[in-house]
Image (tube, helix red, strand yellow):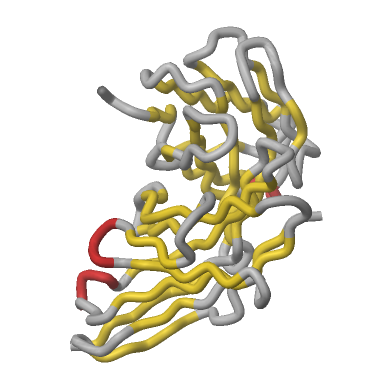
Amino acid sequence: NAGVTQTPKFRVLKTGQSMTLLCAQDMNHEYMYWYRQDPGMGLRLIHYSVGEGTTAKGEVPDGYNVSRLKKQNFLLGLESAAPSQTSVYFCASSYDEQSGELFFGEGSRLTVL
Amino acid sequence: AQSVAQPEDQVNVAEGNPLTVKCTYSVSGNPYLFWYVQYPNRGLQFLLKYITGDNLVKGSYGFEAEFNKSQTSFHLKKPSALVSDSALYFCAVRDGRTYKYIFGTGTRLKVLA
């Protein structure tokens, strides 16, 4: 099993450009999450999904959109990138609705110039 | 709203000494509490969790955590620290009524040889 795979691992964008981060998990997990990690701020939840076809906002959703068309994939989109979106993005998934721990990808480092 | 606080940005401990990394939480309903570890340029890895039952929870790599409901704390402990334990540690809480996992800001543990 590959677990949780994020692509791309690194990306540099110019302000105003768009891009999509892909998260794929092969563990048949229902719940998937996108976080961003910034120094001194820990991990902040951007959006999450409790199942195929569902999405919900987290703590910092502005400037991002997500889609969960297939159970194994959770896409994070930036329509018009801003320097404030320079961060490391982590995808995670969970198998249990109440007590399951999160399984994380290796992260995607995004720089917006 | 649920929240997690990790009051120490960094904890230094000598190899072989016991270590404690502090975490306090605020959540409505029953708390589901987690500890994760992050090594440089990697995703987060699950260490242990408290769902219900014994207040002392044992996890990976010799770590344990003590749940204290009256003090709303979930401190991470290890009897004898190793240099290889040096990493960034995150406490997280999941409210029993939602599917969101909220993380603390992280504590950097440095074990000195």
Residue under the image location 60 percent in, 69 percent down: A40
Q: Eyeballing the image, is B79 above or below B106?
A: below
Residue A113 seen in the figure:
no
x and y percentages locating residue B56 in the rendered image: 42, 67
Please tell me which residue lies in front, A38 or B72.
B72
Q: Eyeballing the image, is A87 above or below B4?
A: above
Image side of residue A67 versus residue A80, left or right: left
x and y percentages locating residue B101 in the rendered image: 62, 46
The quarter in which the N terminus of chain B is drawn is bottom right
Residue A64 seen in the figure:
yes
Image side of residue A28 versus residue B51, left or right: left
Q: How many marks?
A: 0
Residue A25 in which image quadrant: top left
Residue under the image location 53 percent in, 62 percent down: B91
Residue under the image location 59 percent in, 66 percent down: B105
Residue under the image location 37 percent in, 87 percent down: B12
Image side of residue B1 versus residue A87, left or right: right
Please tell me which residue lies in front, A31 or A57.
A31
x and y percentages locating residue B82 in the rendered image: 20, 77
The quarter in which the C terminus of chain B is drawn is bottom left
Q: Eyeballing the image, is A24 above or below B65?
A: above
x and y percentages locating residue A69 in the rendered image: 61, 8
Please tell me which residue lies in front, B10 or B96.
B96
Image side of residue B57 versus residue A89, left or right: left
